[in-house]
Amino acid sequence: MPDTLPTPEAESREQSLRNIVLAGYILQAAFFISGITAIVAIVLAYIKRDEARGTWLESHFRWQIRTFWFALLWGALGGLLMIVLIGWVILFADTVWIIYRIAKGWLNLNDRKPIPL
């Protein structure tokens, strides 16, 4: 247990960052409806990650950034390989992986836990 209680300003800052992280997960999930939302999520994560540096929320921004870039990489590879049919398997695996990353991040955020890296 910490020796001192967080100040109201620190609690407000943490809540604000938590809301941004939550918005990022929602925007990543909305990617399946409209792909542009993933771009909004990555921009938010890049903008706010420095503000979260040194807190448990920093890992969530890093998680969201990595999710975006690896999903894009595997999605592009799967798209290119669709002509030889293995692309469909890659795209399916990428979709499952994205859903897993969003769910794991969201659950850890809800429990106020960092993402273990």
Image (cartoon, rainbow, N blue to C red):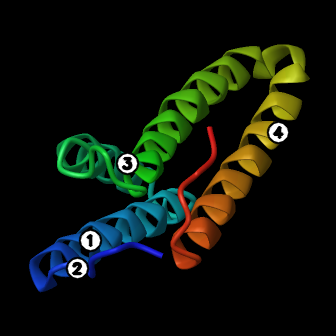
The residue carrying pointer 3 sits among few (fewer than 14), some (14 to 19) or many (20 or more) residues within 10 Å by Cα, namely: many
Disc number lying in front (4 or 2): 2
Nearer-N-terminus badge (3/2): 2
Given residues 12 and 74, the one toward you in this image is: 12
Nearer-N-terminus badge (4/3): 3
Disc 4 + disc 3, Cβ < 8 Å: no
- Total marks shown come to 4
- The answer to which image quadrant residue 5 occupies is bottom left
Nearer-N-terminus badge (3/1): 1
Q: In the image, residue 73 lies at what x, y percent?
A: 58, 22
Left or right placement of residue 108 versus residue 109 in this view: right
Disc number lying in front (4 or 3): 3
Q: Amino acid at mark 3?
A: Glu
Disc 2 + disc 1, Cβ < 8 Å: yes
Give the Cα distance between marks 2 and 1. 5 Å
Disc number lying in front (4 or 1): 1
Give the Cα distance between marks 4 and 2. 39 Å
Whether residue 103 is situated above or below residue 77 in the rendered picture: below
The residue carrying pointer 4 sits among few (fewer than 14), some (14 to 19) or many (20 or more) residues within 10 Å by Cα, namely: some
Q: Please name the residue that numbered disc 1 is placed on.
A: 14
Q: Please name the residue that numbered disc 4 is placed on.
A: 93
- The answer to which image quadrant residue 6 occupies is bottom left
Q: Amino acid at mark 2?
A: Glu
**Labelled disc at residue 11:** 2
Whether residue 86 is situated above or below residue 93 in the rendered picture: above
Q: Amino acid at mark 4?
A: Ala
Q: Secondary structure at mark 1?
A: helix
Give the Cα distance between marks 3 and 1. 11 Å
The residue carrying pointer 1 sits among few (fewer than 14), some (14 to 19) or many (20 or more) residues within 10 Å by Cα, namely: some
Q: Residue at x 17, y 71 (%)?
A: 13
Give the Cα distance between marks 3 and 2. 15 Å
**Labelled disc at residue 58:** 3
